[in-house]
Image (spheres, rainbow, N blue to C red):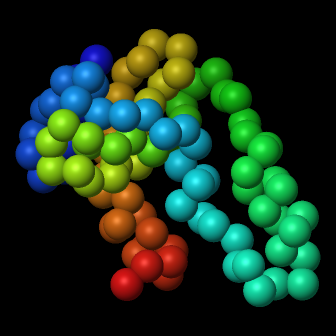
Amino acid sequence: MIIPHPLLGPRDSQEFTYLGDASLIERPDWQAEDAVGRFHDYLYLRDNPAGAHRELWFHEQGDRSWLVVTRDTVTHEIISAELARDVARAKGRSK
């Protein structure tokens, strides 16, 4: 599988480590009143869709960047790849 890295171009998926659902970049506020319940859901509940799914991949054998890859879980077609920092910044989650 080839992942289109936004900075480095096409890369073999063996250069990356798969982390899981991209919702992991939406970490709950630990100071919220319902933080325990939110962290439970954050840590243990995941969707397992057949079709387009956003995933986190770490470019371990490259520039060590984190990517949000949108992949069809049925065909393994890569639909898009974005830097995770850009996705987090767009949501106001990072500097």
Q: Is residue 5 above or below residue 49?
A: below
Indicate the quadrant where residue 78 lies. top left
The residue that appears at 34% across and 67% down in the rendered structure is: 86
Instruction: Give residue 83's quadrant in the image.
Output: bottom left
Question: Where is residue 73 shown, x and y percent of the image?
Answer: 53, 21
How far from the left and from the top, in percent, is residue 74? 53, 14
For the question of whether residue 79 can be seen, the reply is no
Q: In front: 64, or 50?
A: 64
The relative height of residue 2 versus residue 38 in the rendered view (above or below) is above
Name the residue at 38% across, 59% down.
84
Left or right, residue 7 beside residue 90? left
Residue depicted at 58% across the width and 42% down the height: 21
Quick one: 81 or 26, which is closer to the camera?
Answer: 26
Q: Quadrant of the N terminus?
A: top left
Compared with 66, 16 (above or below) is above
Does 30 sit left or right of 87 as displayed? right
Pick the front one: 92 or 18: 18
Given residues 21 and 40, the one toward you in this image is 40
Answer left or right for 41 relative to 61. Answer: right
Task: Give the residue displayed 60% in from the left and 65% down from the top.
Answer: 26
* Place of residue 57 in the rendered image (x, y in percent of width and height, measured from the top left): 38, 41
How far across and how far down the image is residue 7, in percent? 12, 52
